[in-house]
Image (spheres, rainbow, N blue to C red):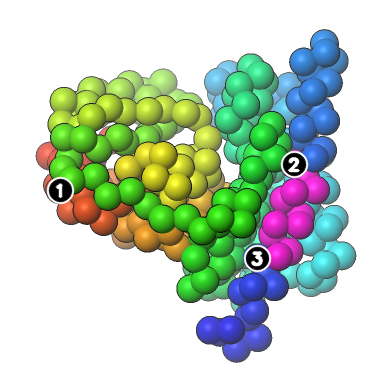
Amino acid sequence: MSDVGVDESLLKSVAVQVATEAAALVREAWAGMAEGREVAVGTKSGATDVVTAVDHESERLVRARLAALRPGEPVLGEEGGGAAGDGVTWVVDPIDGTVNFLYGLPWFAVSVAAQVGGESVAGAVVEPASGRVWSAARGQGAFLDGRRLAVSAPPSLEVTLVGTGFAYARERRTRQSRFAAELLGRVRDIRRNGAASLDLCAVAAGWLDAYVEHGLNRWDWAAGALIAAEAGAAVSLPGAAPELGADATYAAAPSIADPLRTALADCGAAEV
């Protein structure tokens, strides 16, 4: 317990429990879609920014379970909104990777994090398709299904595998594609998987050496960034690194963290 009244281990257990329950709901819906069952789909900021009835159902389940397990603590969710409180605030993405979910691509997750003062202190990312459970508590390491995680150690920028993502807005997505094209000539390769929470977890596992994306919301990174940091990644969150862009989220293996930051700045990250 590093803050008065905050038990990170307990908060992690709650995050794992609630995210796992929501993932079971999402998995059942996903299996039904594979069998031809229809799911209601709407849009938010534009035609490419989709939300499904399952997103809403998942978040309602998470909110109900948190109300039972942690009564009185506020919830900030992608679909239901909310605001941070003075103590613990729960930050929820009921399906991170909704487009993947709709297309049948099994790279999507339920993300639940506990924050205090805007800082993540515990979190879980659970994959409905595979059942994998990623988790971390501040100062206690990061884990995948109980196995402790550690980031990779690429010897140079030239052999660094970088994950990224693109915005929904066409104009910004075009700028991001130019930025990615410039970066591509400096690293081993780039991956764009479509779920920020899982990309951050991939850095924690060493499946990616680094990850950078602009325009994420708090629920996109709240759990995944903690998991990456607890696995040893150098992590920078929106607002912390102007040279990477005001809304950049960044996680990297320490061995290439500094040269990658320099390369990102040189490639125009601040203008993305």
Answer with the quarter of the image where residue 116 lies. bottom right
Q: Which residue is mark 3?
A: 12
Q: Is residue 154 above or below residue 26?
A: below
Local crowd at mark 3 within 10 Å, few (<14), some, or many (≥20)? many
Which amino acid type corresponds to the residue marked 1 in the rendered image?
Pro
Q: Is residue 215 above or below residue 65?
A: above
Which amino acid type corresponds to the residue marked 3 in the rendered image?
Lys
Q: Earlier in the sequence, mark 3 or mark 2?
A: 3
Answer with the quarter of the image where residue 185 lies. top left
Name the one closer to the observer, 237 or 6: 6
Query: What is the x, y in percent for residue 99?
Result: 60, 24
Q: CA distance from mark 1 to mark 3?
A: 33 Å
Which amino acid type corresponds to the residue marked 2 in the rendered image?
Ala
Task: Identify the residue shown where x is 79% and y is 18%.
Answer: 33
Q: CA distance from mark 1 to mark 2?
A: 37 Å
Instruction: Tell me, yes or no, if residue 11 can be seen here.
Output: yes
Q: Is residue 17 magenta?
A: yes
Query: What is the x, y in percent for residue 139?
Result: 48, 73
Local crowd at mark 1 within 10 Å, few (<14), some, or many (≥20)? few
Query: What is the x, y in percent for residue 106?
Result: 62, 26
Task: Identify the residue shown where x is 41% and y is 32%.
Answer: 165
Q: Secondary structure at mark 2?
A: helix
Question: Are circles 1 and 3 on residues that touch, CB within 8 Å?
Answer: no
Query: What is the x, y in percent for residue 154?
Result: 24, 45
> Over which residues does the magenta segment extend?
13-23
Q: Secondary structure at mark 1?
A: helix
Q: Is residue 193 magenta?
A: no
Q: Secondary structure at mark 3?
A: helix
Q: Which residue is mark 2?
A: 23
Q: Earlier in the sequence, mark 1 or mark 3?
A: 3
Considering the image in quadrants, where does the N terminus appear?
bottom right
Q: Which residue is mark 1?
A: 259
